[in-house]
Structures are given as structure tokens and as C-alpha cells.
Image (cartoon, rainbow, N blue to C red):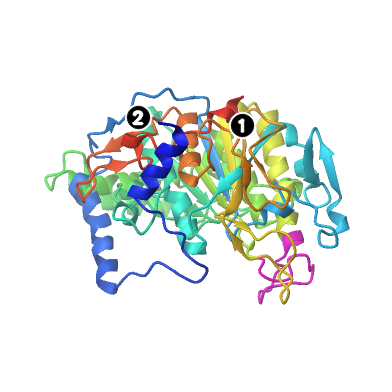
Amino acid sequence: MGERERFERYIKKYPHPHVGFFQRPQRSRRQFFRLLGAGVSGYFLTGPFGPGEARAAAAVETKNTAKNVIFIFLAGAPSHVDTFDLKVVPGVTPTDFQPETINGILFPKGILGKTAEVLDKIAIVRSGSSWALAHTLAQTWFQIGRNPTSALGKIAPHIGSVVAIEKEPERQPGQVLPAFIALNADGAPGSGYFPAALAPFKTVPSPNGLANTAHADGQTRFQARWDLMQSLDAQLRAPDSPLGGKAAGLGSFYESARNLMYNPTVTSTFSYTAEDSLRYGDSGFGNACLLAKKIIAADQGTRFIQINLGGWDHHQGIYDRNQVNGRDVGQNIYSQTGQFDPAFAALLKDLEAEGLLNKTMVVVAGEFGRTVGALTNTNNGRDHYLQMFYVLAGGGVKGGRVIGSTNDTGAFTLDPGWSRYRDVRPEDIEATIYSALGINWTTVRNDDPLGRGFEYVPGGDDNVYAPVHELWG
């Protein structure tokens, strides 16, 4: 049985409906509290980092070429045919895109000029395809690597939380930063049924450093209060707590938070100068990319960093520099690439300069693509579309190349460009991330509250999804 036939049989057995524009997953109040309870009770019943009883559905060979992952999520869905799968439409594509063929890759140098300078470091997958066309659904789908409306999807952890639990045994004494940090990503999914300590540590960059790491009354007063609290009930949160492992788990939260306070390494890692910010584009996204590089360089236990850049939902005025989409900032292809371009290029250049790119995989994607050809007649924009791209760099990925190709309008995949002979799905990128980190993507954990067995990547027993190992050349 061929890989494509295997995939199609699996999809027929477990349908993945293409959800339309305005559909959203709905949950009742009762369902909400049931899910909330499952997450909370899951932590207090198992304690931090429960045994898991994991098994591998298959003996696979991982690439194991990366130590860290930086996942850049372009929420809102960028137009693939205006960026990383450029299709020049006469009378439509703006001339200031300055299309240029660079080492065989047609690229919009006018809006991604800095990125053009690092094309030799990136691989572009043009045969990507999303499962859904509703923003919230498709965004969550990508970040947890499965259908959010499925039974296990409702309690599934973020990919970063899976990385965190897998890499916990490798944590070194003295490393104080959370394993999973999310920058400008307040809406990112959490740790699902995994322990709360594995949830993304969400923060927003500030030149003054990490917020709330100093007490308003000073370090001396804080230390006095800490010592008083410890004298009163430290034993209740100790590893041998008389209340059991559930209460002991809370102690790890206290200690982790305490280790971030008045810590010179934390302060230097999360603070930055105006000069550094300017080099990354002097934007919130640029500052997040700058912090990501600094966090990786600090080597304080963080293994997965997510950075969000929204504002790509260009239904109208995609080429209109004055289009603001009802907001107080520009929301057009120029404003968004203007933030992405200098920051992304600076990130790759700095990682390489500091010897970190070869062990840090950088992944860039949105939740889907946008309609191709002419713009919408009334709004001069592009609507939701399943065809999409993925951009990867570092962690052993061979740059300066394109995997897969689309037809002359970008409407569909002509050549998938990889061994599975089909479109690359978000689950395949999830498997790619795990393989790069040396994690068996077919792992099944038997600790989920539903008792179904939680697969790191769905369909492991059926060999449905797989890493795009062609990225390594």
C-alpha cells in the first residue's frame, strides 16, 4: 500500500472536515467547566510530571539535530502567493514587490528584502495544506497538532508542552527558566491535561526586563516575607509533604517563581537596549525575536519558544498602505511584512553568528493561506484558502531550497516534493519538530484522563503522518 493510499484510507476512517469561514467550535458552559476540571484535577491527581507510561507505536529514527525550537506563528494567515510562494499576477501584483529570482527562487524582494539576504539559510515548503478555514479552529489545530474538536483534542497539550515534558530529564541544576516560553502569544493553548508547570510561560518583551521579578518594597522586605512563609508552612509543600505529592507539587511553582526574582541572569536575558531593538526592526515582534535569541543563548532550560505576529487577515485592502482594518495600526501586507522581515532576518543572522543556528530549529507558518489570482472585487483583499507554506531553518535543515511546488496561480500542489507524495499537513510539521529534537513522534502516553492513550502525533499506529526529512537534504 502506497503512502498516499494509506493516508486517504485513514482520513476516510477518521474524517477531517473542512470547516468554513464563519464556523467556530462551540462549547456549552457545562462542557467548559468539565474540561477545566479535567485539566486541574489532572495536575493534582498525578502531581508534577507524572510517570506517563509512554510507549512508542513504532521504532523510528529521529534526526536529533536540534536542541531548541523557535516557532513563529503568523496568526491571521498570510497570503502564500504574495510571500513565500510568490505568483506574479499581471495588473494585480504591485510593482514595488520587486520580484526577483534569487538562486532559483522567485521572491518578493521589495517587501521581504532582509529575508532575501538569508534565503540560503531557509527551506520553503510550498506543498502545505490546512485542515480548516476558521481562524480559531485552524490556529489551535496547528499548535496542538490535531483537531481541537476531537475528544483528545479538547485536552491536548501544546506542542511546546510535549517538548517540555520530554526534555525535562535533560534539565541541568541551576537552569531557572521555564522550558516553554511564549512571547506576544497570550492566546496560545496551554498544557492541556499535562501538569500546569508545563504550560507556556507567557510574557511580553520590555526593555526593562521580565515583569514582577522585583518586590515593590525591595529585596530585603521580600526576603523577610519569604522566610516567614517558609517558617509557617514550608513542610506542607516539601517533597515529603504530609499532604502527599499533590500539595508538594505546588512547592515547585513557588520555587520556580522565586528563582526568577532578583536573578541577574534573568534580568540580563530579558532586558535589551534601544540599539538592539532597532536592529530587529523596533517593533513588538522584533523585540520578541531578539528575546528569543537571548533566551536560547542564555541556556537556562528553555527548549521551545513561540512568537506570535498577528494581523495577516487581509480580506480587504491587502495592498493598501492606509488600510487599518478598524484598528489603530496598519493591517496590510506592507505593515506586516515590515515587522516580520527585519526581525526574522536578524534572528537567523544572530543565531548563526553566535553558533546557535545549527542547534536551533526555526519554524514559520500561519494557520492557512489566502485566495489566489485576482483580488476580491469589492474589498481588494484575499480570503481564506487551504493551500499554505511553511518556512524552516536551522537545526540541521538545508537552506536555500524549496520543497514542493504549486500550479501557476498557487491554487493547488503540483509536486508535493517529499516521500509521502501528498500535501504537508500541520501534523507532519509537528512530527518534523519532534524528530529534530530527538523525540519519537509515534509516542503514545497512557496517562490521559479519558483513558484513550494520547498520541504525540495522531495516527501513529497507522503511520499516517511523518516528518518531512527531505528538509535535511
Any magenta on residue 322? yes
In the rendered structure, which disc, 2 or 1, sits on the residue that comes first in sequence? 2
Residue 343 visible, this angle: yes
Which element type, helix, strand or loop, lies under badge 1?
loop
- Tags 2 and 1 in contact by the CB under 8 Å rule? no
Q: Which residues are magenta?
A: 314-335
**Badge nearest the viewer, 2 or 1:** 1
Q: Residues within 10 Å of mark 2 (few under 14, many from 20)?
A: few
Q: Residues within 10 Å of mark 1 (few under 14, many from 20)?
A: many
Which element type, helix, strand or loop, lies under badge 2?
helix
Q: Residue at x 33, y 48 (%)?
A: 13
Between residue 80 and residue 282, name the one nearer to us: 80
Left or right, residue 191 beside residue 244: right
Residue 217 visible, this angle: no
Instruction: Name the disc covering residue 169, or none.
Output: 2
Q: Position of residue 213 (x, y in %)?
A: 48, 52
Q: Residue at x 36, y 43 (%)?
A: 458
Q: Is residue 11 above or below residue 352?
A: below
| Quadrant of image for the N terminus | top left
Q: Which residue is mark 1?
A: 394
Between residue 219 and residue 60, name the one nearer to us: 60
